[in-house]
Image (cartoon, rainbow, N blue to C red):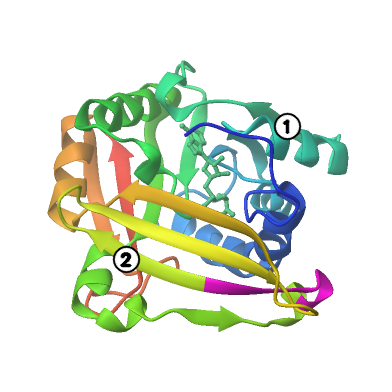
Amino acid sequence: MTYRRYSKYSIENPRVWAIGQDKDAPLEVPQLIQLLKNYGIRKGNLLDMGCGVGSHVYEFSKKGFEARGEDADPAKITFAQERWPELDFGVGDMRKLDAVKRYGAILCINSILVFNETNQEVLQTLKNFHRALKKKGLLIVEMSNPFHYIKDKSFKETFVDRGKDRRAFGLKVDYEEDVNPDRQTMISKRTFYRLDNEKKVGVFRKETRMFFPQELQFFLEQAGFSVEGIFGGIGGRKGLRGARRILAVGRKK
Ligand SMILES: C[S@@+](CC[C@H](N)C(=O)[O-])C[C@H]1O[C@@H](n2cnc3c(N)ncnc32)[C@H](O)[C@@H]1O
């Protein structure tokens, strides 16, 4: 992924991204802490890889975890460092992580692994995570569930987001999601319009690879993990039918 200068309205603009992540993190972190506990991890240090603007790191640190956040996007990391100078953030690419036996857990949540384009990159990233974990350390990866996108065609409908946050920016957003079966990718497109005069002010398009559960399991095992569970989403719900998200827990053998 290359990082361009952001349009003011781009969803990747740290200020815009923070609106959503700040809302999600306080809900997701307690669920993630419960999940870690279920696998024997109560405290300790963890890495949030692809941490975005750092809201999850902030919530984890409030709960007594020693959390570090890394993201490949320098703008998001600068934003996080300015907001929480006392916390630990750094620019980092998952494909180049070179830490050794440093973390009790690594989290890769809200679609990070999907930015690896080739199978070699996926394997390299997972091997990096494996090396960076302490013995018996836990890896949590979470992303879109391809079954949902293939079975439930309703995702293809476009819808307009006129939510409070968007209104605060004076905007509405058209969402479009699609799959490209040739490239086995998901395409998300957001078009931003001004609310007052309907003028188009920006388009954000993202194409990322998809992972089926067995494929994910295979990659994790190849990288040296035992797969402890594959669930539908962060809430740890069992079963993948209809679930929008997929979450896998791997343990360093
Ligand atoms: C959908 S966002 C999720 C951010 C955050 N985890 C959250 O829950 O809001 C995906 C993030 O992955 C980051 N990313 C993309 N490629 C990456 C890479 N190779 N290494 C690390 N982070 C990457 C992007 O910069 C972006 O912040």
Q: Is residue 61 visible?
A: no
* Type of amino acid at the residue the image marks with label 1: Asp
Q: Within 10 angstroms of label 2, few (less than 14), some, or many (20 or more) residues?
A: some
At 30% across and 45% down in the image, what residue appears?
A: 250
**Picture quarter with the C terminus:** top left
- Residue 171 painted magenta: yes
At 61% across and 72% down in the image, what residue appears?
A: 173
What residue is disc 2 on? 178
What is the secondary structure assignment of the residue under circle 2? Answer: strand
- Residue 172 painted magenta: yes
What is the secondary structure assignment of the residue under circle 1? Answer: strand
Image quadrant assignment for residue 168: bottom right
Range of magenta residues: 167-174
Q: Where 98 sits versus 34, above or below? A: above
* Type of amino acid at the residue the image marks with label 2: Asp
Q: Which of 231 and 203 is in front in this view?
A: 203
Q: Which of 54 and 183 is in front in this view?
A: 183
Question: Residue 17 at what x, y percent from top left?
Answer: 67, 56
At 32% across and 69% down in the image, what residue appears?
A: 232
Q: Which mark is residue 88?
A: 1
Q: Tell me if 121 is positioned left or right of 182 in this view.
A: right
Q: Tell me if 121 is positioned left or right of 82 in this view.
A: left
